[in-house]
Image: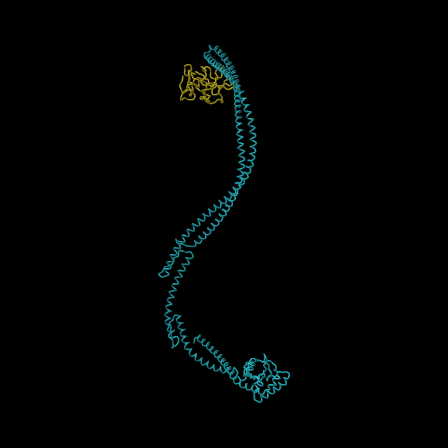
Chain colours: A cyan, B yellow
Amino acid sequence: MKAEIKALFVKITITLLVLFVLAALALTYWQQQKEIDRLVVQKNLELSLTAAAFLQNLPVDSVLSVSAKPEAAKEFYTHLATRTRNFKQRYGVPQYIKLKIVRLKDTISEIVFDEGQPAATGNAYDLWLEMKDASTADRETYHLEKRNKRYLLTAIKPVKYRQSMTPLLILAEEDLSAFRQPFWNMAYQNGLVFLLLFVVLEILFYLYLRPFGHALEYLNESIRRLKEGKPVLKPEFESKYFEEEITHLSGLKQRLDEVDSIRKAREEEQKQIKEFLHIVTEAAEGDFTVKANVTADALGALSDSFNLMISDLSSLVKDVKKAAIQVATTTEDILTNIEEMAKGAVDQAAQTENISSLAKEMNELISDTNENAQKAAKAAQKAMEVARRGSETVQKAIEGMHAIRNAVRESMKQVRILDENSTQIGEISDFIAEISSRTNLLALNASIEAARAGEAGKGFSVVAEEIRNLAERTNSSAEEISKLIQAIQTSVSLTLSNIEKGNKEVAEGTRLMDSAGESLREILETVEVSSDSATSISEATKHQTKYSKQIAIALEEITVIARETADNAQQSKEAAKQLETLSKELNKAIEKFKLSN
Amino acid sequence: MEDELRASVVKIAGQLFAIEIKYIREILPMPKVTRLPNVEPQFCGVFNLRGRIIPLIDVAPVLGLPNQTLSQTAFVAVCEVNGRNAGILTEKVQEMRSIEVELLHVPDNHVQEKLLPFISAVYKAAKNEPIYILDMGALFESAELNKYRFE
């Protein structure tokens, strides 16, 4: 039999065993309870009768009075004990019945007399409620209590004296446990019965389980064969169990064959898919030159689509590459431009600083100009004064000049006359010189002729020589005269020219005076103008100061702006550098794609 | 040869020359000169002397001296050499003098090249300017003066 079946069998056996044991114990317990009830019923009567008989024999009044006076108790109680003993002997009350007299107080019950324990007199007792009940209703009650493996049955009878209820009650107590059968004896008996039952069941169970096990083994074997791919064998036995399942087995074999072929087809597919995956992985890593095999099935369609996609991607990436290169170029340009801009901004800032310092200098110059203008105004005032005085002087001088000019004109007239005369003399003397030179020449020619004449002309040549000498002397005299005349003329002309010069000078002087006067007037005007100008310069420089201050402020602002521009340019440069980095990254990222060209 | 030479000392182009008196016919102040076209610079033109047409010659370029100008203070020495008459343009006629032959000497290396063929001797008195004695014959026979025929 199969191990599982065996295990099942064992499990069920153990379960059944346990169940039966528990059942036996439960049954025993139930039987014991029933027994108690039976005993109670049985013994109740005995106790009741005993209690009634004891009551009859009891000196109730003495008990009542003694119980109120505990000092006299001991003696009485001994007496009571003897009485009780006698009573019991007489009536044949078995020893196992214990008698008690209990007094009912308000809230507790007190032992008046206890046969078993004489010293217990005065002790508190239990069962107040039952006793109260019995006393009130004048009724006999019973109380069953399990205490320490003892079943105590107590009959409670209220004591009546002279038709009235006393607080006393009589209790007859008995231990039922003595009459009971021991638990384990009963259990043992029950157990045997159950064991028998168990064995029978086991045998039956085994008999039913065995064919089940066989059938299961057959199924197991068949399934194992099916798993290994072998055909299923026919069962060796007639089995009632798993008939349906056995018929299912053959169907299962068919199915398995189908599944096998499907699996093979699947494997083939998987291989194709793996190949495809390999190609796709390569493409994913950037190699766009791969091409997937296109077959006739769904995967082939997928491969075809994939190829299409890759070629599209390839062209896309090419475009991106181109664009990336352009971006890189443009970024370089931008960087260059920004560099220039930054440089220009820096230059601008420097220039503005320059201008700023120049403006400051200009400011100083303006204030200097202001001072100078004021000085100039003062000087102009003075100049005006001086010019006025000069004008007066000039007037006087002009009058003097006029007088001089008149005198000079007179002397000039005389000198001219002198000049004319001397010129005439000169002309005459020139004439004389001319004559003498001609004479000289004639004498020369004469001597020449005389030389040509030879001897005859010797006397003539002497004469000629004398004439020449005379002529020479005349010539020299004439020259002297001429010289003298020249000298006179020179001095005359000199005088004349001096006079002329003097005249000219006077005229010049007059002119100068006039022009001086004019100049002074002009100076006056100019000085007035200058004074006005100085004042307006002063005003203007005040304005200028204001404006130049404004200029300075504006320049400061420009400097700030220029610096900001420079900063912005710097930021733009960094942004452009970032862009460059990004474009480099883009290029790098694109590089890894292998494209077919 | 006589022991003294009678010559007329003239200044031509700043240099003193002596023209023997036997060659001189006449000395006159600058006359009215009619210029001639297309002639060389030594021919200054022609002038009318008592009805005769005499050529005016400036010997300065022939002697290698700077050309003279026709100024009114210039003099013309009319010379007759071998029957030919010409006026020699001079700046000034200095004097008529007798020159001792002993004091003449041969032109030395101080004299310029061009002058040499036309100088017969040099007269140098102490501290005075040297006077070159013009050789009128050579001058009138020279190629420069014979470019144009004249009588």
Residue A534 x, y percent position in the rendering: 54, 35
Residue A129, percent from left and from top:
56, 80
Against A293, residue A97 (above or below) is below
Left or right of A178, for residue B80: left
Q: How many marks?
A: 0
- Above or below, A426 against A22 in this view is above
- Residue sitting farthest toward the front: A163
Q: Quadrant of residue B41?
A: top left
Q: Position of residue A418 (x, y in %)?
A: 52, 17
Q: In the rendered image of this protein, does residue A582 appear above or below residue A192? A: above
Q: Is residue A312 visible?
A: yes
Q: Residue at x 54, y 23 (%)?
A: A399
Q: Residue furthest bottom?
A: A90
Residue A80 falls left or right of residue A241: right
**Residue A514: x percent and y percent?**
52, 26
User: In the visual, does A505 lie left or right of A74?
Assistant: left
Quarter placement of the N terminus of chain A:
bottom left
Q: Nearer the viewer, residue A86 or B63?
A: A86
Residue B100 in view: no
In the displayed orientation, state which residue is furthest to the right. Answer: A71
Foreground residue, B146 or A155? Answer: A155
A177 or A530: nearer the eye?
A: A530
